[in-house]
Structures are given as structure tokens and as C-alpha cells.
Image (cartoon, helix red, strand yellow):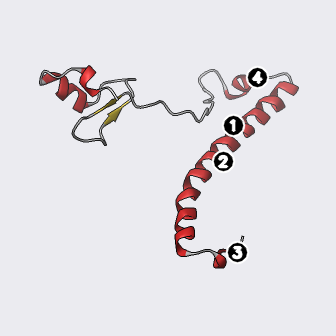
């Protein structure tokens, strides 16, 4: 690709797309490598967990992000998926008499 033929607008659009594409490809490459390592170990009669030890946990990257379930009505940057511990802003909202139903997206 010859970048000198692209307009400034096209270059900026490309610049915005690159980080997301890199992240996606790196995640997929990690999954592929992990699968290759599993197959390599299996071909020799081992599970990857056996080689890493009992305490080691292998994290499988799925690439799926959990959707936001709750959002602050006044500050859209404050989000919560509903998983794990309640954020402080949710606790404050509930402490002031608010309801989780009011925060649903």
C-alpha cells in the first residue's frame, strides 16, 4: 500500500482502525499459538496443564467482551457490566435511594 497516495482524511481513518485491528489479530494469534502448544503436548502424551504444574492456569482468550448493563444517567463514562463487585458510584447511587432499574442500559 502506497501511503503517499492517500488523503489526510484517509490516513486518519486508517490510523484509527489500526489499533483495533492489531488488538484483534494479537488475540487471535495467541489463541492459535495456544492451540498449537496444546496439540504439541498432546502428541507427546501430555496436557498443557501437566507441563505447567497444578497451580498454573491457562487462560483462553475468547475475545468476547461483556456488554455494559448499567450506566450512570449523568456521566456516561461510568459503566458496569453487573459482574463482580459493585463500583463505588453504584453503591453511592443505591445509598441515595436510587434503584438499579434506573441505571439499566
The residue identified by callout 2 is 25
* Quarter the N terminus occupies: bottom right
Q: 3 or 30, which is in the foreground?
A: 3
Cα separation between marks 4 and 2: 26 Å
Mark 3 or 1 closer to N-term?
3
Is the Cβ of the residue at disc 4 closer than 8 Å to that at disc 3?
Answer: no
Tell me the tag on residue 2: 3
The crowd level at tag 3 (other Cα within 10 Å; few <14, some 14-19, many 20+) is: few
- The residue mark sitting in front, 3 or 2, is 3
* Quarter the C terminus occupies: top left
The crowd level at tag 2 (other Cα within 10 Å; few <14, some 14-19, many 20+) is: few
Mark 2 or 1 closer to N-term?
2
Splitting the image into 4 quarters, where does residue 90 fall? top left
What is the residue that sits farthest to the left in this orientation?
96
What residue is drawn where x is 53% and y is 74%?
8
Cα separation between marks 4 and 3: 46 Å
Q: 69 or 59, which is in the foreground?
A: 69
What residue is drawn where x is 26% and y is 34%?
72
The residue identified by callout 4 is 47
Splitting the image into 4 quarters, where does residue 35 fall? top right
Amino acid at each position: 500500500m502506497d501511503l503517499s497516495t492517500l488523503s489526510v482524511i484517509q490516513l486518519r481513518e486508517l490510523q484509527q482502525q489500526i489499533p483495533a485491528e492489531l488488538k484483534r489479530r494479537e488475540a487471535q494469534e495467541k489463541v492459535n499459538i495456544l492451540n498449537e502448544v496444546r496439540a504439541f503436548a498432546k502428541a507427546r502424551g501430555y496436557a498443557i496443564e501437566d507441563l505447567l504444574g497444578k497451580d498454573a492456569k491457562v487462560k483462553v482468550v475468547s475475545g468476547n467482551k461483556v456488554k455494559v448493563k448499567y450506566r450512570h444517567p449523568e456521566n456516561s463514562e461510568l459503566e458496569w457490566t453487573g459482574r463482580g463487585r459493585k463500583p463505588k458510584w453504584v453503591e453511592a447511587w443505591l445509598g441515595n435511594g436510587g434503584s438499579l432499574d434506573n441505571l439499566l442500559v
